[in-house]
Image: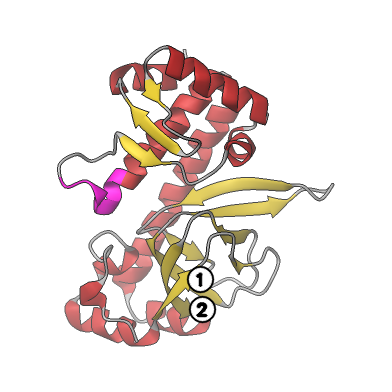
Amino acid sequence: MFDCDECLVRNRAICSALEPDELAMLGKLGRKQQVARGQTLVWEGDESLVVANVIRGVLKLSVSTADGREQIVGVVFPSDFIGRPFGKESPYGITALTEAEVCIFTRSAFDSFAKDHPNLQHKLLQRTLDELDRARQWMMLLGRKTASERIATLLIEVSNRLGATGCSAIEPFLDRFELPMDRQQMGDVLGLTIETVSRQLTKLKDADIIELPDRRSVIIKDRRRLEDLSVAA
């Protein structure tokens, strides 16, 4: 059982559509689970046994290519919903990029609850459509944007998504944050080589748009220029 009143993302997660008594009922079905960095929560192709709300941390969605390589197809942040409700198999693996915490439910229990609560089903549909929109935007990014535009887009996306988690009480974004992925993983997400990722980050640093205090930390010094750069010509 999980006390939803203590949840850090209760106002942004899909369960925000529920009334207090309904939320209490759902809380009895879930439990908090800590996920270590690198731990796989769901394996690609396995039966979809669980679904979860991300409370803290960042996780990746990935699939295996025909030659055995990993392709990252998505990144999820706090308040995102993961898993496949009403589905039998998971089309991708879900692995923690950072230390994470999730509110996890068995799929069967969550499905039964959702069927009796139309507001929750509506919220699930909204999230599904939002994910579809993001997937289309990502297709445009990979198909049209240059390497520098891709890197700028990813930095803006991470800044905005981490800011939306409530880490900043003043701004809806963060100008200083820890990247949840390494250079190789950034390349996997963006369709770039690790050398290109490193080169483009160095160019942004030399242009005084960002600072890179270490391998993971990013400081956005000129957000407007970075946002302008993220827009494909």
Q: Residue at x 58, y 54 (%)?
A: 61
Q: Residues within 10 Å of mark 1 (few under 14, many from 20)?
A: many
- Vertical position of residue 220 compared to residue 2: above or below: above
Q: Residue at x 41, y 48 (%)?
A: 130
**Image quadrant where one finds the N terminus:** bottom left
Per the rendered image, the range of residues in magenta is 163-169
Q: Is residue 42 left or right of residue 176?
A: right
Measured from the top left, where is residue 85 in percent x and y? 51, 71
Amino acid type for the residue under numbered disc 1: Pro
Q: Is residue 191 left or right of residue 222?
A: right
Measured from the top left, where is residue 56 in percent x and y? 37, 61
Residue designated by label 2: 107
Q: Residue at x 59, y 29 (%)?
A: 142
- Vertical position of residue 31 compared to residue 182: above or below: below
Choose between 5 and 24: the one closer to the eye.
5
Choose between 109 and 193: the one closer to the eye.
193
Residue designated by label 1: 85
Choose between 166 and 85: the one closer to the eye.
166
Looking at the rendered structure, the secondary structure element under dot 2 is helix
View extreme (left): residue: 170
Measured from the top left, where is residue 59 in percent x and y? 50, 56
Asked if the residues shown at circle 2 and circle 1 are in contact, with their CB atoms under 8 angstroms apart, the answer is yes
Measured from the top left, where is residue 114 in percent x and y? 39, 77
Residue 37: say if magenta: no
Q: Main secondary structure of the magenta part?
A: helix
Residue 167: say if magenta: yes
Amino acid type for the residue under numbered disc 2: Arg
Q: Is residue 209 left or right of residue 72?
A: left
- The answer to whether one can see residue 117 in this image is yes
